[in-house]
């Protein structure tokens, strides 16, 4: 399978707990989160809704973007989500 670097944000619910991650296979990674196959933060806090993602041309670019987003304050992340997903729709079906 061809790698497709991406940065993504998961949420537990609208304005709930947020998780920022990066992956080379967005569909596989989100599926893992949704099915609690990834131990840790997202499993513990039930953070399963894909509310934002960006596709990048390289993993280095995606990782650098993830690092920047993780330093953002919560309100900036919420604004980023709401710019493209004002209803906090779970975008899972959109990426299949």
Image: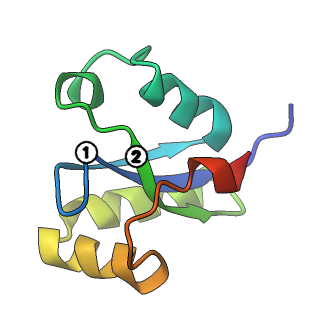
Mark 2 highlights which residue? 49
Which residue is at the front of the view, 66 or 96?
A: 96
For the residues labelled 2 and 1, the Cα–Cα distance comes to: 6 Å
Q: Residues within 10 Å of mark 1 (few under 14, many from 20)?
A: some
Image quarter of the C terminus: top right
Q: Secondary structure at mark 2?
A: strand
Which residue is situated farthest in the right direction here?
Answer: 1
At which x and y percent is residue 80?
Answer: 35, 78
Q: Is residue 64 above or below residue 37?
A: below
Q: Is residue 34 left or right of residue 18?
A: right
Which residue is at the front of the view, 88 or 17?
A: 88
- Asked where in the image residue 45 lies, by quadrant, the reply is top left
Mark 1 highlights which residue? 12
Q: Is residue 79 above or below residue 88?
A: below
* Residue displayed at 22% across by 79% down: 76
* Residue displayed at 67% across by 56% down: 94
Residue 25 seen in this snapshot: no
Q: Secondary structure at mark 1?
A: loop
Q: Is residue 23 above or below residue 63?
A: above
Which of disc 1 and disc 2 is earlier in sequence? Answer: 1
Q: How is the image coloured?
A: rainbow
* Residue displayed at 53% across by 36% down: 30
* Residue displayed at 44% across by 14% down: 37
Which residue is at the front of the view, 90 or 76?
A: 90
């Amino acid at each position: 399978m061809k790698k497709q670097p991406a940065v993504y944000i998961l949420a537990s619910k609208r304005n709930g707990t947020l998780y920022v991650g990066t992956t080379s296979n967005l569909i596989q990674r989100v599926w893992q989160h949704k099915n609690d196959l990834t131990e840790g933060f997202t499993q513990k806090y039930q953070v399963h809704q894909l509310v934002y993602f960006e596709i990048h041309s390289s993993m280095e670019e995606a990782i650098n973007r993830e690092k920047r987003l993780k330093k953002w304050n919560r309100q900036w992340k919420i604004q980023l989500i709401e710019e493209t997903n004002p209803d906090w729709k779970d975008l899972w079906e959109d990426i299949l």
